[in-house]
Amino acid sequence: MPVLLLPSARALSVDVLHGGRVMTNKIINVDVRGTSAEVEIPQDDLVAQWEEFFEDNAYDPKIQAIADLGDKSLAVRFGEVDRHRPDLAAFLLRRPLNAITAAEEAIRRHMPPGTGTPTIHLRIVELPSDARIEVRSLGAKYLGRFVTVAGIVAKASARKPRLTDALFQCLRCGTIIKEPQDGQNFREPLECYEEQGGCKRSASASKFKLLMESSSTMDTQMVDLIDLPSVHADTDTNSLPAYLEDDLTGEVKRGDRVTANGILRGRRDAKSANLEFILDVVSIEPELASPSPAVLVMDLNGAVSILKTVLDHPDPLFHICVILGAAQDHVIDLLQTVFYLIFGGGPDTGKGTANAVSMALCRNGIVLGGASGPYLRDTLGGGRAVAISEFETLFKENPQILAVVRNGNRRITAKVGLKIPAGNGWVNVEVDTFGFKTLDYHDRVDSHTVSRSLHYEMVRSKNLDIAMDAEYLMERLAPVRAWLAYRAGQAKANGWTAEKVRATWDSKEFRDRVRKFRDAWGRHGIIAAYLLLLNDIFEFGLEDQVREIMDAREPEISEIAQEVWEVIDEMAGSGLKPTDEFCVSDIITRLNAIRKDRGLRERPRIDGALRELGLNNKSPNWIPARKNWSGPNRGKAVILPYDIVQAWRKSPAGIGSKGSKGSISQESLHMEGESANATDATDATDFPGSVYNEDEGPRHPDARKRAALEQAKDDTIRDDGGPEP
């Protein structure tokens, strides 16, 4: 098995590798101009290039300090090599073993006199982005290359010794010879090497005894890496065995998120031409090697406490909802659907801060800075979490943002076509919009989005410290973000995969738990199920709190009912009177005009939506055309929405929800850019035949309409604390 980690070639010059036979006296370099031509560089010239690099970049003092302290590694950023000699950097990526061997020889030559020849390993860190690959994307073209794999440690072995230079005694002549061990496979001498004073007998003509106590050894550790969370629908559980040696061993544990830089090798199974990928690790990025002690001891209460230092809200479950929302981003590859968070409220209530906080808890979340097609194309994708600040403003800039929000919560609908300017025309590009999203608004939000969200009305905080601490929220929330990443890694290491999520979702036990939620149906039931699933994956222990959140939310009305309500609310304006009546046909006309602007097909009827909103054609608030015998809309179907509109507007969460959470609070203002109130000139007291009495209020000549007015008056008396009728 040709598995060679950096330290195994530590102090051996190239001409003594493989038992003294010359490996090569030339190095094949790569023409960085991209042509197929290759140039041969003598080994000594390559060593000289590294010596020049160390001298020009002031590495001599660092090398001396490492030798004095007895350390074993010298870290070098790839970017430094690339700036010094791009051809050397390109060669390092294509022929890492040869380049690192030459570099370590150059380091040995720069060791201070009198220190002997201890091994100092070269640890190349911060490789370029084009060297990064995922475990699922491994292929033969990467064999022998210097690559970066960011992953989660699914399994870590104990530290074990490994032979590096094995000493053997020839039992025919007694000569002791050295056989360097190249990687993880044990290798015996092919002959009693003459250049080491041997008798030249082959292995078939002599026997060799391993002198274990006299041989050189080095610590080694094997870890299995699996991919970090991503947006691939067909997530597999393939792992990549990675070998760490010498001072790298013992640095990582199961569940750690690491960035491993190393040489990708192929290991052959016995009697098979197929190779198994393995990674010989050269370096591990120190900032990702292991979670900090603060992350290891943090729990949900600690995370909530940190969150409260930058974001204030009176609801005790608010901060838990924010954490659950962001947790979706850390396991996005396991999910088929996500729920959104919507923040409402007046000016200076912290809506923008809530957006920023949510993104700061995600892997690489971002608050959108615009809505142009090219910007969305370049920003979205990869399961990236995004926040949309001032939804109405971005919608006005580019209505395509509505498709991003509408379709981005489900994986199967997330591919959205965007129009991008190209030359003198436009082209369509497909963008994957799937991912966790938050948004804030001033007026209203699309009803489709409302039904897939948890909603909170923000309140103005009077705590100065919170406002000032929020200026540095990224730094303050870094421990919580790292904690979520660590818990996600632990979950994957404990067996949570896309397949396990599907099995859990389909299981009778899980569905029975979801059915215990109040009104567990429709999108309300789906959100409840995903909250429960996230609780299981991260082991938060929040099932009671999740039930409290969802029971307070209550199921939202249907999408068409939400749309009809928005039209009625707009037509009602701020001066609605008990005698005002709206033609159903006018409502349909306005509704379809709005849907046309949004690129949606027309709705021919709204009867079901009106019933869902509490109107009834057998009650005074909905009069069918055949029974409308008087008034300006005689012979037309009309509604008298005064009583229900007053009830909707008094609800703290609006028509979208009966509780305080989970949906959008709709105000009577119309969206910026839309037409104004369509019924401003309507006054029922001017109807022919109507009678107005200052003591009794307006009366309508139609008995059914008069009954509606009387009911509205009774409701007003009760609201004002008056006697029951």
Image: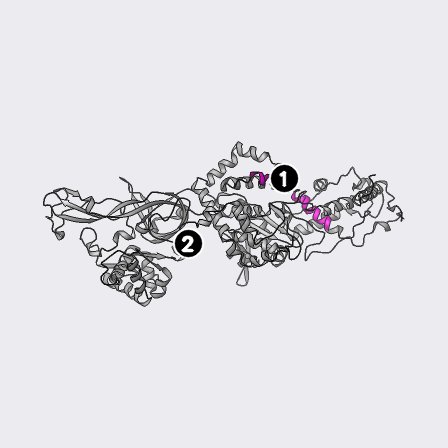
Query: Which element carries disc 1, helix, strand or loop?
Result: helix
Q: Can you say which quadrant of the picture contains the N terminus?
A: top left
For residue 360, side relative to residue 570 (left or right): left
Q: Position of residue 628 (x, y in %)?
A: 82, 42
Residue assigned mark 2: 287
Taking the spot 49% from the left edge, 43% from the top edge, the residue there is 334
Q: Main secondary structure of the magenta part?
A: helix
Marks 2 and 1 sit apart, C-alpha to C-alpha, by: 42 Å
For the residue pair 151 and 502, the one nearer the viewer reads as 151
Q: Can residue 721 be seen? A: yes
Q: Going by the picture, which residue comes out furthest to the bottom? A: 56
Q: Can residue 413 be seen? A: no
Q: Can you say which quadrant of the picture contains the C terminus?
A: top right
Taking the spot 20% from the left edge, 45% from the top edge, the residue there is 213
Query: Which element carries disc 2, helix, strand or loop?
Result: helix
Task: Answer whether residue 107 is magenta in the image.
Answer: no
For the residue pair 400 and 54, the one nearer the viewer reads as 54
Mark 2 vs mark 1: give the one in front.
Answer: 2
Magenta segment, which residues?
542-569
Asked whether disc 2 touches disc 1, contact meaning CB atoms under 8 Å apart, the reply is no
* Amino acid at circle 1: Asp
Taking the spot 59% from the left edge, 48% from the top edge, the residue there is 341
Mark 2, Cα crowd under 10 Å, few <14 / some 14-19 / many 20+, is: few
Residue assigned mark 1: 551
Counting residues from the start of the chain, the first of labels 2 and 1 encountered is: 2
